[in-house]
Amino acid sequence: MNDEEFEYCHNFAVWAGARASQRGFTTVKVLKDALDNCGIKDFARQPSLLTSADDFNR
């Protein structure tokens, strides 16, 4: 998957999360920021970054 396709999938995930939370749970910006800052992009590109159960739990 190239970078453009990856960003498209990421943005779709952000949109899907926002749609799921439209009942007042949070804002799209909060969801997008959470996804952008939690390391999921790096993990999705290279799952081998996850090396232990403790890493997964974090």
Image (cartoon, helix red, strand yellow):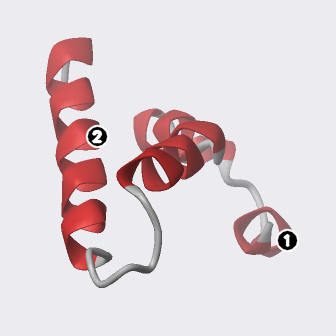
Quarter of the image with the N terminus is top left
Q: Residue at x 46, y 55 (%)?
A: 31
Query: x, y (%) of residue 32?
Result: 44, 45
Q: CA distance from mark 1 to mark 2?
A: 25 Å
Say which residue appears at 17% left-offset and 46% top-offset: 12
Q: Residue furthest right?
A: 54
Q: Give the residue drawn at x 53%, y 37%.
A: 36
Mark 1–mark 2 contact, CB under 8 Å?
Answer: no
- Quadrant occupied by the C terminus: bottom right
**Residue located beneath label 2 in the image:** 10
Looking at the image, tell me whether mark 1 or mark 2 is earlier in sequence order: 2
Q: Is residue 54 left or right of residue 23?
A: right
Of circles 1 and 2, the one toward us is: 2
Is residue 18 found left or right of 43 in the rendered image? left
The answer to which quarter of the image holds residue 29 is: top left
Q: Residue 16: image x %, image y %? A: 19, 62
Asked if residue 37 lies left or right of residue 10, the reply is right
Coordinates of residue 4 in the picture (x, y in percent):
18, 15
Residue 1 versus residue 38: which sits nearer the camera? 38
> Would you name the residue on which mark 1 appears?
54
How many residues crowd around disc 1 within 10 Å: few (fewer than 14), some, or many (20 or more)?
few
Question: Number of numbered discs present?
Answer: 2
Going by the numbered disc 2, the residue's amino acid type is His
Under circle 1, the secondary element is: helix
Residue most toward the top?
Answer: 3
Kind of residue indicated by mark 1: Asp
Above or below, comparing residue 55 to residue 21 in the picture: above
Residue 30: which numbered mark, if any? none
Query: Is label 2 in a helix, a strand or a loop?
Result: helix
Q: Quadrant of residue 6?
A: top left
Disc 2 crowd, CA 10 A, few/some/many (<14, 14-19, 20+) = some
Of residue 15 and residue 57, the one placed in the foreground of this image is 15
